[in-house]
Amino acid sequence: MRKGITIEVTPADRTRLQSIIRDRNSPQKHVWRARIVLLSAEGAGTMAIMRAVGKGKTVVWRWQERFMQEGVAGLTRDKTRPSRIPALPAATVDRVVALTNQAPPHAATHWNAPAMAKAVGISPSSVRRIWAGQGLQPHRVRTFKISNDAKFADKLKDVVGRYVDPPAHAVASASTRNRRSRRSTAPSPGCR
């Protein structure tokens, strides 16, 4: 054990620590923390505690100090840590939202995450997180987008005209439709 370190465990603390160790539903991290403190109180050295618990020297020292400062409650509570990924600035989020509501500069119907990420200078996953957080779904556009094709109007009239005024040979008779609907629903031999 380190010099000058004495761990005093009251009978109430000892009972609580032993109950944590015996409880099968206790998280394992709480169990080995409690074992570190009990072994330290019994006078075991750092190397013996390391072997018994299977943790490193700095881990043993950290939980000994935490117990001395905060008691048993300090062993069962983890300190909060900052996120590994720093939060994006609000200006970046606002820029992504503003660009999403505009037409993309490239020849596409809507923004996709890689294109937006390249335009703003962040990762595609960050763009997806912003879109999810703001409830944006740029791939679901409710308005009709007109094509830049010069012959689009003629093509549109041709396609719409086929369905409004179909040629005589394209109409199926009622008897043909009824025959098709009565076919068996058994799987074909190739699906077995």
Image (spheres, helix red, strand yellow):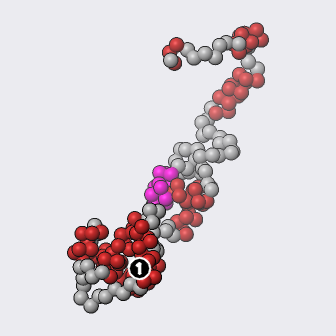
Quarter residue 8 falls in: bottom left
Q: Position of residue 149 (x, y in %)?
A: 60, 36
Region rendered in magenta: 113-126
Q: Is residue 182 above or below residue 53?
A: above
Q: Is residue 145 above or below residue 170?
A: below
Q: Residue furthest bottom?
A: 4
Asked if residue 117 is among those painted magenta in the image, a careful observer would answer: yes
Front position in the image: 141 or 28: 28
Q: Position of residue 84 (x, y in %)?
A: 42, 67
Asked if residue 2 is among those painted magenta in the image, a careful observer would answer: no
Quadrant the N terminus occupies? bottom left
- Which residue is labeled 1 in the image? 14
- Tally of numbered discs: 1
Quick one: label 1, few (<14), some, or many (20+) residues within 10 Å?
some
Quarter residue 42 falls in: bottom left
Q: Position of residue 92 (x, y in %)?
A: 52, 66
Q: Secondary structure at mark 1?
A: helix
What amino acid is labelled 1 in the image?
Arg
**Which residue does the image show at 62% across and 39% down from the upper left?**
147
Confirm whether residue 176 shows in the render: yes
Q: Position of residue 60 (x, y in %)?
A: 30, 76
Task: Describe residue 136's horizontal placement relative to residue 16 as left or right.
Answer: right
**Which residue does the image show at 24% across and 88% down from the upper left?**
3
Front position in the image: 130 or 186: 186
Quarter residue 171 falls in: top right
Task: Describe residue 176's horizontal placement relative to residue 75 as left or right.
Answer: right
Q: Residue furthest left?
A: 47
Identify the main secondary structure in magenta: helix
**Which residue does the image show at 64% across and 33% down from the upper left?**
152
